[in-house]
Amino acid sequence: MHRYFAFGPLGRLVVGLVVSGVCLALALARVDVAQTIASLLHVDWRFMALGVGALLASFLILALRWRVLLASAAPVPVRDTLSGIMVGYLVNTILPLRVGEFARLGLVARRHRLNGGFVLGTIVLERTLDLLAVLALVAAPALLADVSEAVRIAIAAAGSGTLIVFIVLVCLSRGHSKFDDVGRRVPGFVPKWLVEKLTRTLIRFVDGLSALRDRRRLVSALALSIGAWLVAGLASVFWIIAFHFSIPWYAGFLVLGLVNLGGAIPSSPGAIGVYDYLAVLALSAWGTDKSAALAYALTTHAVNILINIVIGSGYLAREGLTLRAIPGLAIRQERPRETVSTG
């Protein structure tokens, strides 16, 4: 994976397109098109609608959580954190290289005059909490289902890696008071202006982790993370019911877990192919017919993409912006207000 990030933007785009193409080919292999179409025609749209409602509710809970993480710097309204999240989803859906996180960083930092390094710290903490919550919810279904050993190893590896990252973030947060002295330990041949800039960036980033030093905010963030992904898992459960699959209800959480862990895999915009293959792979653990599983993957993926585009575009218009403004959004910020570290 580190070699992937060593490529330039064009190289990463090419790798993502190749991976998406391979995954889409795997998802479509040995599929009975007639059976896939038949499954699509028999979908219970009432349960699909319930799933959409649950998914939208999970977005709102995630917006509440981001507000909690930003609270040490500014009382950001939920409508603005939700706007940032949905614009980020929109950008990741239609633009390459997954710049959605930087788009929402710039959006919220600009509107509330927050330092970009601080906002980045809250987003990194967010993503770590997301992975912890998803892995916790997917662990039991992965043990109960007939998944391959490779999938179990991948889940265990992701869990170990995420736990290590969380511990590192906790250590950074606890040592925030010592970063003022970092510049004194750097060799003298390093330009002073560079040392000062990097030190300031590091301090602001660590300020974004301040929830790790505030027990009440940390508990709130953890609870909201688990709640958001439980509700998102409920959306998958409703969609499984909509397709009349005779599999356990908790299969929805394995589907949710695998398609979201797949976010770490290089892919095309919108995770075309990767989402579909992983959804089919998850459903196959209960012997679901591959053609019917593909119908589920294509339909739910389309629903996710449509939601991201429609709602994200609405919030982008609310901000008075167009997609052309996205590349420079993260750097065009107003003068940041002072952030407050909470011990």
Image (spheres, helix red, strand yellow):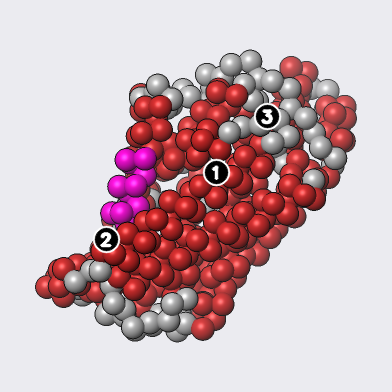
Instruction: Give the class, few, some or many, for how many residues have Cα within 10 Å of label 2's Cα (few <14, many ≥20).
Output: some
Magenta part, dominant SS: helix
The image quarter containing residue 265 is bottom left
Q: Amino acid at mark 3?
A: Ala
Q: In 3D space, how far apart are the residues under numbered discs 3 and 2 (Cα atoms)?
A: 39 Å
Residue drawn at x 35%, y 72% is 240
Residue picked out by circle 1: 63
Q: Is residue 302 magenta?
A: yes
**Mark carried by residue 299:** 2
The residue located at (40%, 55%) in the rendering is 53
Q: Residue at x 69, y 36 (%)?
A: 71
**Mark 3 residue element:** loop
Residue shown at 25%/69% (left/top)?
44
Q: Which residues are magenta?
A: 300-311
Q: Which residue is mark 3?
A: 74
**Residue 297 higher or lower than 151, as above or below:** above
